[in-house]
Amino acid sequence: MVKAGRSQIRGSARPIAFRALIAGTVSLCLGSCVGKIDLPAGTAGPAGTGAAGDPGAGGGSSILGTGAGSGGPASGGTGNGASPGTNTGGVSGGGGGAAGTGGPPLGQVTAFACDASAPPPLGVLRRLTMVQYRNTLTDLVTWALGSASAGATMMNELATPLGELPVDHREIVPQDLHGTYRRLDQSLQQLHVDATYDVAVAAAAALTTPARIGTVVGACAADSVASNDATCLDAFVRKFGARALRRPLTSDEVDFYKSAYGATTTADPGAYADLIGVLLAAPEFLYFVEHGDAAVPGQSGVYQVSAYELASRLSYQLWQTAPDDALLQTAADGTLLTSDVYDAQITRMLADPRARPALDEFFSDWMKVDELPALDAKDADPVFKAFAGADLPDANLRQAMIDDVVGLLDYHTWTQPSGITSLFTTELSFARDARLAKLYGVPVWSGTSAPPSLPAGQRPGLLTRGLFLTTGTANTRPIMKGVFIRKTILCNDIPPPPPGANAKPPELGPGMTTRQSVEAITQMPGTVCAGCHATLINPLGFATEDFDALGRFRIEQRLFDASGNQIGTKAIDTTSIPQVRLGDQTPISGPADLMNLVVGSGQVEACVARNFFRFTYGRWEDPTTDGCALEDSRKSLVGGGKVTDLLRAALRSAEFQRRTFQ
């Protein structure tokens, strides 16, 4: 019996139609889960105030100036824009305002306040992502059939219903209108219901064919002996059910799922198919349904998750799938709840190849790789065709640029583990595509040998790679580059653009470089654009203008007319005052200087901690209640900490092992 007030699944043992029974299990779960089912929405915090020339004092920070359930960052009153905000509650305040206006809520966080008495937010019912769902089904089928090859064969048979599954999207939230992590995508449409139902029916039928039922259920389901049928059914429900639901079933649940079999226990492949189908459509197969275990002293409504629930959290975080035999065994004997065994399981799982794809999803979503436009359809544009010349992209270049950046992150995580800041200074190339390697001027990397070195001082760190420079046009986009660095790498806030702002890339003026055109349009003194563009955005983007819109190094920009005829060249200017920390007037001459300021700002570690929190918990962070988990992660990266140190810190945090119930 679970404690009152927490989620609980019960059912009555009576025959019922298959689809109706599935609907009943959903109702049983969702109807008794006490808590929020939607993601917690962010709320705007109070604005700070300041006298002329003074900064505002902030109470929190987020991407677009709205906190996630906490006070938002402050805006200065009528300041001069030179002073940073004061640190309140462990997070930095907003910047001082421009003369006569409210200042931008930058929220330059370098540390988080940890209040160990603050309970985690109320738990929400999260569904598996479609990647996790596929992986879970594959592993369950492989386990049931006893071999990887048999599992692969059956999954191929399910290609049609699996093809109906929706695709997870990077969820758009108020704090990030460009889209965040796929794990935040908790939409539930009729398509999800229909597709997972169809997969459950098809998989159940495939597992109970004459050739497979003896392996899946046992010889007792295929022999002609009737006396063992009841025992056979009971054993199968307990064994298969525990694997599908990722924990042992209660007696009530055994009776409930046996009711899906029918009124008798006579061995029948069709009845076993109904039973398996119900289990594969059960809420506890499709969702993270948690009941909790021991109450956390001094925190009302907060419980340690059970050993089986912790095993699932750990496995889905590191492998994107259900726990394996070794992890389930530590849950069964309770040793997973001891620090030594828990740490040993983390070490074992990180050493497994399955840890790489899960982290690659984090890398891909963090770097927003799917925003790179298609490149191979631009040859119809005479300007782009003339600009690209012999480097006109083919259909493979886009993916090559994505693989290049993910390869860089992988290499410095697994092959040669390095401090997080080395990602922004490395001069190694990870281009495995000949066209991309040519753009960089280096040999193709084999993927296994030592990566080739880029020209010294020319292309430091991941932000100088084609993925972040290529636009699909003949012109660079310094505004978007600046916004990306400010928001995604530094986690600074940028106020939304004013109403009526032009969202289209600026057109080049006659005889002007991209930088000159951007400056003329967005940095005119006295305009509403200049306040943000001239200080927060453009200078960051200008630092990498020595790379063109295909990522090629250059010292001058070629200018073209509308027909693609080159009409001149102009020198590139990469000097700026980027104010990586607001108010810092340090000038830079290009990307190397910028990267040094970025890694020296102390903001990278805090920003990575924020982003990994979002990936881990499938929600936006609240620095007030999540400060301990955030600070644990941030500190793991300080002083040369590696990505694997971040993983361990996140998994060891108290919040990862607890849940709040209403």
Image (spheres, rainbow, N blue to C red):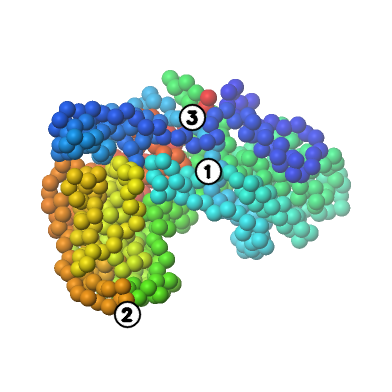
Q: Which residue is mark 1?
A: 186
In the rendered image, is residue 203 in sight? yes
- Residue 222's place in the image compared with 508, above or below, is above
Q: Which mark is residue 390?
A: 2
Residue shown at 26% from the left, 73% from the top: 560
Depth check: give the residue in front, 524 or 661: 524
- Which is more foreground, mark 2 or mark 3? 2
Q: Nearer the viewer, residue 492 or 8?
A: 492
Considering only vertical position in the picture, is 328 above or below 553?
above
Type of amino acid under label 1: Gln
The answer to whether the residues at label 2 and label 3 have Cβ atoms under 8 Å apart is no
SS assignment at label 1 = loop
Image-quadrant location for residue 70: top left
- Which SS class for mark 2? helix
Front one among 238 and 330: 238
Residue drawn at (22%, 76%), measured in percent from left and top? 567
Locate residue 532 relative to residue 311 in the image: left or right.
left
Label placed on residue 260: none
Q: Is residue 611 left or right of residue 201?
A: left
In the displayed structure, 283 sits above or below 400; it is: above
Where residue 45 appears, as percent x and y from the top left, is 34, 30
Task: Give the spatial CA distance, label 1 vs label 2.
Answer: 45 Å
Q: Position of residue 595 (x, y in %)?
A: 21, 54
For the residue marked with disc 3, what is the amino acid?
A: Leu
Which amino acid is tagged 2? Ala
Disc 2 crowd, CA 10 A, few/some/many (<14, 14-19, 20+): few
Q: Residue at x 79, y 42 (%)?
A: 17
Instruction: Please report the residue visible at 58 percent of the width from the left and 41 percent of the height from the top.
Output: 287
Looking at the image, can residue 639 be seen?
A: no
* Image position of 377 (left or right of 632): right
Which residue, given by chain and number where applicable, does mark 3 sit on?
A: 122
Q: Residues within 10 Å of mark 3 (few under 14, many from 20)?
A: some
